[in-house]
Amino acid sequence: MDKKTIIVYRWNSYSEPALIEAMKKLGIDVVFFDKRLRDFHADAMFAAVFMNWIHHHKAEAVFSFDYFPLISSICEVNKIPYLAWIYDCPMYTLMSPTLSNSFNYIFCFDEAYAVRLQQEGAKNCFHFPLGVAVERMEQIIGQADEEERAKFRSDISFVGKFYNGSENHYRKVVFEEYTRGWLEGLIEAQRKIYGYNFVRASLPQKIIEEIIEKCEICLGKMYCDAPAYLAADVVNIEIAAREREDTVALAAEERPVALYTPPDFPEKLAANPNILNKGYVNNATQMPLVFHESRINLNVTSRTIETGIPQRVLDILACGGFCLTAYQPEIDVFFKDGQELVMYTDGEDFLGKLRYFLEHEQERCQIAQRGKKAVRERFSLKDRVKEMLEVVGVLGREKTI
């Protein structure tokens, strides 16, 4: 039987190599395409070359992590499936009118986001949690010598951004006094609630308009108008920024915390002698060592992700790391709290569990091992990719999730 050919559009997502490897193990002939898109909707040179690749390789489908409207349009013209696996939220390219194209197959890691996309016209949109290549993580960890591992050894670690830079519009503008007070109240109220996000539903139209105007948020004429969602994202990013700062500061009251984040991290953390920022970490070669060698790995999910399991949680567990994470609905569905990872629901709960597991080494290690077993059995990247390709009909018979 001839191999099926899939074109993978590569844009340097760190998950791409593992996904390509998984496709090859399934007998797929993978062809890379990595020409840079100058415009997500209109790039004549890109479109011409991409069309030629589809025809030359007789491609059965095109795949990308996240969503690219021009690729969707090209696949629509050629009547071949475009598989977009969404792991970023928000993903503003999904506000393109191309969302409703018939040959789109959108796999979204966040169930609430998937439902929203379906309501906005996505014909083939599925809630589809992410996957992880446990064997690849094991290989990276196994190849590292003791000296290399020791560089990443710590009691507590956090890998990620603090949203205190250009992506945080909330901190860049001066709102009207009433608006600022109203938003501050909303932020503090939402911070007390885990598992349900009410920010968008709570924003009055007048405040939405002020956020959009003062933050100068404009996606352009090629995108659908969604001011309420854009304004909510501004607020949710600020909530995430505060939660990450406060969580790390709380952790540092107990033990030294190793950060792997850009150098311009929050000043109040930089001034804390118990917090050491080790800078950027290479996702492909070093991040697995951080997760494996840290006694406790912190995950503070961005509030822009309403229900889904972030890739970071799966990566931590795949490396045999212990994960202490903020409560998230889908984490609660797919994992056993206290047995495969540990969730917290406020600062007091966080501190109590952090202290407990720093002192109970054997129990912590057992939870980490069960977490690794769970992702191997339920979130194998090869199995996830196989199921995805079966949905589209590239492998086996088409089915529904």
Image: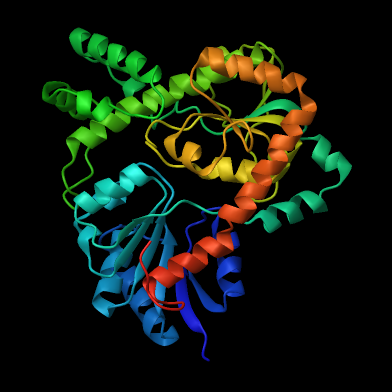
Q: How many marks?
A: 0
The residue at the far left in this view is 206
The part of the image, by quadrant, that contains residue 398 is bottom left
Q: Image check: 23 left or right of 363?
A: left
Residue 128, how many percent across, how many down? 42, 54
Q: Is residue 155 above or below residue 96?
A: above
Residue 215, image x and y in percent?
25, 27
Residue 61 as seen in the image, left or right of residue 386: left
Q: Residue at x 66, y 28 (%)?
A: 157
Residue 381 placed where, x, y %?
Answer: 57, 59
| Residue 216 visible somewhere in the drawing | no
Farthest residue, direction right: 146
Residue shown at 29% from the left, 16% from the top? 186
Q: Nearer the viewer, residue 237 or 197?
A: 197
- Taking 269 as reference, is 44 left or right? left
Find residue 43 and report its image quarter: bottom left
Q: Is residue 283 above or below residue 298?
A: below
Q: How is the image coloured?
A: rainbow
User: Would residue 110 be seen by someone viewing this image from the given angle?
Assistant: yes
Q: Is residue 252 above or below residue 66?
A: above
- The answer to whether residue 328 is above or below residue 109 is above
Residue 162 x/y as whole percent: 50, 27
User: Which corner quadrant holds the C terminus?
Assistant: bottom left
Tell me the residue at 76%/36% (across/down).
293
Q: Is 124 positioned to the left or the right of 356 in the image?
A: left
